Amino acid sequence: MARLDINNLWVQVDGLDILKGVSLSINSGETIALLGPNGHGKSTLLGAIMGHPKYTITQGNMTLDGVDLLTMSTDERARNGLFLGMQNPSEVPGVINSDFLKAAMNTRREKPLAMFQFYKALDGATKTMKIPLEMVHRPLNEGFSGGEKKRNEILQLLLLEPKLALLDEIDSGLDIDALAMVGNTVASLQKKGVGFLVISHYARLYDLVTPTRVAVMIDGRIALEGDAGIIQRIDKSGYEWLRIEHGIALEKEVVPMNMTSIGVCATKEKTTK
Amino acid sequence: MKRFSLYKNNDIKGQTLVRLPASTYKEDQCQILIEGHVDMVLECGNKPKPVQLTISPSSSLKLQIIGPKTNTDWRLKMQLADSAIVEAWMVDLGSYEGQITVNGDLKGSGSVLDWHLASLAHGQDKKTYAIYFIHDGGHSQARMTNHGIIEQGAKLTFTGSSHILKGATDSATHQEARIIVFDPNGVGRADPVLAIDENEVSASHAATVGKINEEHLFYLQSRGLSEDEARRLITYGYLRPAIEQFTDATTKTRLSQTLEARL
């Protein structure tokens, strides 16, 4: 069992508040759908949970199984059972995918995997994800299509078996067959008790992963929580009904521009003879 | 594939792999004439003598260089005749202080020189590479790619100079230098120079010296790799492609093991 608690989390990027007091809990076996308009802080929340260095926590706290997450480095968070499936996975030149996968799997083990154990696990996971084995011998994500990168993220999810997985628009760039595979993979891990926090703009992914709860983020706050009916509503009517029925302002707070002068514009006077 | 050590000046023909243990040199300068299609490894070892390669018309050379092991300076000269082609890969994992000077003289019309360097500077190492390409022949093409890693206060300098002479019409020359500096005490410098004396040519350069890409580091760490493991994997990945270009499997394995040991 694992439990992630986020309490009144405030996060800044470049001095600007992006998250403004997020509180949310996720338990093993739960799947939470996180929805919200573009640019309202959903990806920031996932990045902050994983400890991305560009996010500064200014208030609040996060705990994983009661242990303060903010004192853990990113790799410690991962080794303690968190996984972030990224929206735009980095291309890391020269680092061979299989070397990376093996190193990542070994971080969770006391004794390194024997070669045959690793290839057995890899063979099974690549077959499940219908990834050609050749792809795992290429440099990590380098030259991969958008869909291949996302499949590679799910491949890692399968091999690393986290306690809680955060999936950031994992469905973007995927064709229908690949989307079904993601759905099947998530379903199989749900049965093993893995918890999920899933960001997507599309009901078709949520149809496959059957969320137990839904949270809607507006302007860096969880504005609404409820059941899967919210997804259908947003899919049908967008977000405007939140304003009408719940009085939730959908606009982001406008930060005034810095009025500092950047200098004086020099103009050349036209002279006429 | 034939293998031998070079004790004196040689003419190399056909498919041949040449090991060049520097400690056995008897001449002040090794002169090698390349004819046909040659696959050659130059191993600098300790205190290597300068090497001069002359590539005959329409000949091609795949040159693989293993850098010096101890403090030294070394010079390599390559002269390319008409339609001669050189593809050169240098892997320098040695621990030393010194300067490597490479002169590529694209004398012949239609000659091609494709140069790649992968260098690791660690600890007390102070490595300088001065690489000069001169385009004398028309329609000549050169590419210079220098990649380096600096760890634990080492110093690494790439100076690349490409000069297209008057008369070398329709020539193309491109330079790329990239250095990753892993710690604040390391010093990295890349100085690309282009000198163009002819119109109707193509020339470019790009140079970056900087820290490791934070997104790359975050990605690897988000899978549980510690910062040290992530850096090790990135360094290995940065230098490995040059090792992969070595034809001889034994040499390739040896270089990979040396790199693993140094990391």
Image (cartoon, rainbow, N blue to C red):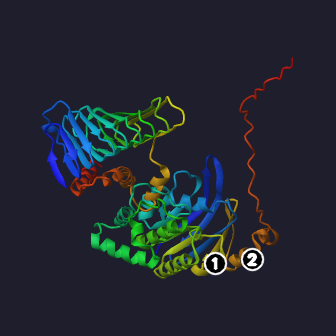
How many numbered badges does the structure rendering display?
A: 2
Question: From this viewpoint, which residue is outermost toward the top?
Answer: A273
Q: Secondary structure at mark 2?
A: helix
Find disc 1 in the rendering and name its residue: A204
Q: Residue at x 38, y 64 (%)?
A: A104
Residue A127 in the image: state x and y as whole percent. 42, 78
* Amino acid type of the residue that numbered disc 2 sits on in the rendered structure: Lys
Disc number placed over residue A36 in the picture, else none: none
Residue A118 or B226: which is nearer the viewer?
A118
Q: Is residue B47 above or below residue B263?
A: above
| Pointers 2 and 1 within a single chain | yes
Q: Is residue B185 above or below residue B244?
A: above
Disc number placed over residue A236 in the picture, else none: 2
Please state if B224 lies on the left or on the right of A272 as rendered: left
* Amino acid type of the residue that numbered disc 1 sits on in the rendered structure: Arg
Residue A204 or B200: which is nearer the viewer?
B200
* Crowd around label 1: few <14 · some 14–19 · many ≥20 (10 Å): some
Q: Residue at x 82, y 70 (%)?
A: A244
Residue A227 or B31: which is nearer the viewer?
B31
Residue A162 in view? no
Instruction: Mark 2 or mark 1: name the one nearer the start of the chain.
Output: 1
Distance (Cα) linking label 2 and label 1: 12 Å
Please state if A174 lies on the left or on the right of B161 as rendered: right
Residue A173 in the image: state x and y as whole percent. 58, 68
Residue A227 in view? yes
Q: What is the quadrant of the C terminus of chain A in the image?
A: top right
